[in-house]
Structure formats: C-alpha cells, structure tokens
C-alpha cells in the first residue's frame, strides 16, 4: 500500500498491496480521495450557531454541524471552521461511523479549551478534550490552532472527578489524515491514536513549554500503518511515543525539541509481553531533547 503526496516528498510503503489512497492539492487545500468522488457540501459551524468570540460556549454548534455532516451520504461533506474567529469548546465526542464514505474538517479558525477547571466539568472525567470515535476516512486540515490551555493542569490543579485531559484523541479511526494545523499547550498528551490503522500526519506544529509535564506530542497505541512527516514537535515530554501493539510506523523529516525525543515504550511492565515492530525513523532532527530515538523497558523483577 502506498500513500502518494504530490507536492514532493516520498510515498510511505506499507504492507497491504490491496488499497491505494491518493492525496493531492487543490489550491491551498488538501483533498483526500480514497478512490471516491469529491464534493463541497459545506457545513459552516457559524451557520449552526457558533459565535466565535472565544467567550461563549460553541460546543453545541459544533456538535450540530458534526451530526449534520456525518449524517449525509452525499459526497465528502466538509465542516468549516472559519479563520479570524476563536471558538470555545468544552469536552466533546464526535461519534461515527458516518454515512458518507469520507468526511473532512477544515480548521482555519482557532479552537480553545475552557479557561477554568470548572469549565471542564462536562466530560472531563474521561480525561480527554476532543474525542473522535470510529470515524473512518476523516481528514482534519487547515491553518488553525487547537489551544488546550493546559497551564492550570500542569500546576497539578484538581477538579472533582477529573484528570488532566488529552487534547485530540482518535479511537478506531482508520484512513485518517491530519495536516497543517497547530496544537499548543494541551493539558496532557496532545494527539493520541488508539486502535487506528492507516494514519497520515503531515506538516503539524505541536508546542508546549519544556517544563510542562506529560505533554507528549503524538502517542501511538495499538495502531498500525502510521506515517508522520514534515512536522515540528516541541513539548515537555516525548515528541512521539509508540506504545505496545503498534507496528509499521514511518517517521520522516520531523524536528523534535524540546522534549524527551522519540520513544518506544515503556514496554514490559509487570513482566508483560509487549510488542512493537517495524518502526522507521529517518532524517529527523533533535534539538534540546534529553534523548534521540530510544526504547524504554521496565526492569525484570522476576
């Protein structure tokens, strides 16, 4: 299987020869075809009531836009988050599967998390901010920013029933593409892929202070066929963390730092048998990191 990116760069080989996914540029946007037709059915979050003033809660407007786009079976629906606006979102879950073969979110505005711990009360018990579940053929691209406003969590602040949330979490989302946007100051890990297959990450910027705890840039867990390229990741923990059950990971042209480097593990806790295989790290830069690329294992106490 090959991904093809036609603005230069190199295809990322995978081990499944039966499927070809093609990415190509149209203007400044990236279009994801997967062998299907492309259409521009636009679902602007402002048409669903989002104010974009950074103060009012726009969560319900985003959910309404998602439910409408996910519920259509026409072409490739696009949820548009316009530039020049700031949208406040409380913890949200975007559920699939969707009726259309693919769905796209164009993030050109800025999305911010609650400013206070009390603002996290709706759903923070699950430890995540924006959660995508079983959404296949999803593309999230654009020039906007996700700001997790994590500094209050880094100070070990607590709220009853809550724990420091992950920024973006994708669970069982196959054929996923993330491109172009920025993620800053997540309370915990910035982006997590769990039980996903065929993921392509391109030109992301992920940032948090070097002193911010547990703010890993990208975490890959139980996932396979993951490509990460042409991205900048500088946080207070691992730039990229690869957990047990993951395989066929290609990381190229990533600038990492500050942070702890690119890590596999930790593996073998409690004497368990954990497997990670086919991880390839090429042409990456490490600046101001505590490590380069490493494997972390637990000591055998038996």
Image (cartoon, rainbow, N blue to C red):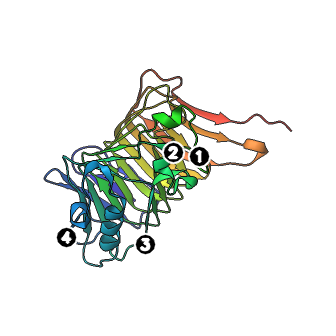
Disc 1 on helix, strand or loop?
Answer: loop
Residue 146 vertical placement versus 260 (above, below): below
Q: Residue 296: x, y in percent?
A: 64, 34
Q: Residues within 10 Å of mark 2 (few under 14, many from 20)?
A: many
Find the distance from the CA under tag 3 to the CA under tag 2: 23 Å
Q: Residues within 10 Å of mark 4 (few under 14, many from 20)?
A: few
Disc 2 on helix, strand or loop?
Answer: strand
CB under 8 Å between callouts 2 and 1?
Answer: yes
Q: Residue furthest top?
A: 288
Q: Residue 302: x, y in percent?
A: 86, 39
Q: Residue furthest right?
A: 302
x 48%, y 28%: residue: 259
x 33%, y 69%: residue: 64
CB under 8 Å between callouts 4 and 1?
Answer: no
Residue 5 in the figure: left or right of residue 267: left
Label 3, on which residue?
97
Residue 241 vertical placement versus 21 (above, below): above
CB under 8 Å between callouts 4 and 2?
Answer: no
- Upstream in sequence: badge 4 or badge 3: 4
Who is closer to the viewer here, 295 or 234?
234
Who is closer to the viewer here, 228 or 52?
52
Residue 224 in the figure: left or right of residue 178: right
Disc 4 on helix, strand or loop?
Answer: loop
Label 2, on which residue?
219
- Upstream in sequence: badge 4 or badge 1: 4
Who is closer to the viewer here, 11 or 170?
170
Find the distance from the CA under tag 2 to the CA under tag 1: 7 Å
Q: Within the image, what quadrant is residue 51 found in?
A: bottom left
- Upstream in sequence: badge 1 or badge 3: 3
Label 1, on which residue?
243
Label 4, on which residue?
39
In this orientation, does residue 56 appear? yes
């Amino acid at each position: 299987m090959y991904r093809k990116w036609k603005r230069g760069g190199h295809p990322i080989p995978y081990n499944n020869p039966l499927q070809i996914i093609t990415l190509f540029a149209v203007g400044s946007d990236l279009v994801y075809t997967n062998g299907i037709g492309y259409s521009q059915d636009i679902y602007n979050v402002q048409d669903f009531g989002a104010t974009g003033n950074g103060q009012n809660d726009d969560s319900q407007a985003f959910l309404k836009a998602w439910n409408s786009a996910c519920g259509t079976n026409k072409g490739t629906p696009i949820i548009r988050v316009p530039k020049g606006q700031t949208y406040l979102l409380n913890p949200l879950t975007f559920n699939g599967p969707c009726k259309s073969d693919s769905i796209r979110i164009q993030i050109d505005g800025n999305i911010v998390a609650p400013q206070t711990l009390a603002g996290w009360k709706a759903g923070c018990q699950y430890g995540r901010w924006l959660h995508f579940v079983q959404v296949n053929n999803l593309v999230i691209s654009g020039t906007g920013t996700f700001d997790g406003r994590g500094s209050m969590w880094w100070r070990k602040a607590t709220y009853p029933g809550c724990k420091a949330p992950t920024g973006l979490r994708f669970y069982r989302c196959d054929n996923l593409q993330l491109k172009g946007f920025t993620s800053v100051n997540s309370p915990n890990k910035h982006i997590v892929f769990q039980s996903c297959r065929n993921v392509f990450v391109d030109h992301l910027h992920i940032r948090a202070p070097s002193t911010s705890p547990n703010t890993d840039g990208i975490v890959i867990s139980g996932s396979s066929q993951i490509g990460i390229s042409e991205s900048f990741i500088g946080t207070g923990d691992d730039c990229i963390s690869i957990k047990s059950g993951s395989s066929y990971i290609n990381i190229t042209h990533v600038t990492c730092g500050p942070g702890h480097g690119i890590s596999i593990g930790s593996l073998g806790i409690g004497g368990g048998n954990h497997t990670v295989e086919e991880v390839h790290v090429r042409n990456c830069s490490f600046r101001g990191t505590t490590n380069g690329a490493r494997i972390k294992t637990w000591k055998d106490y038996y």
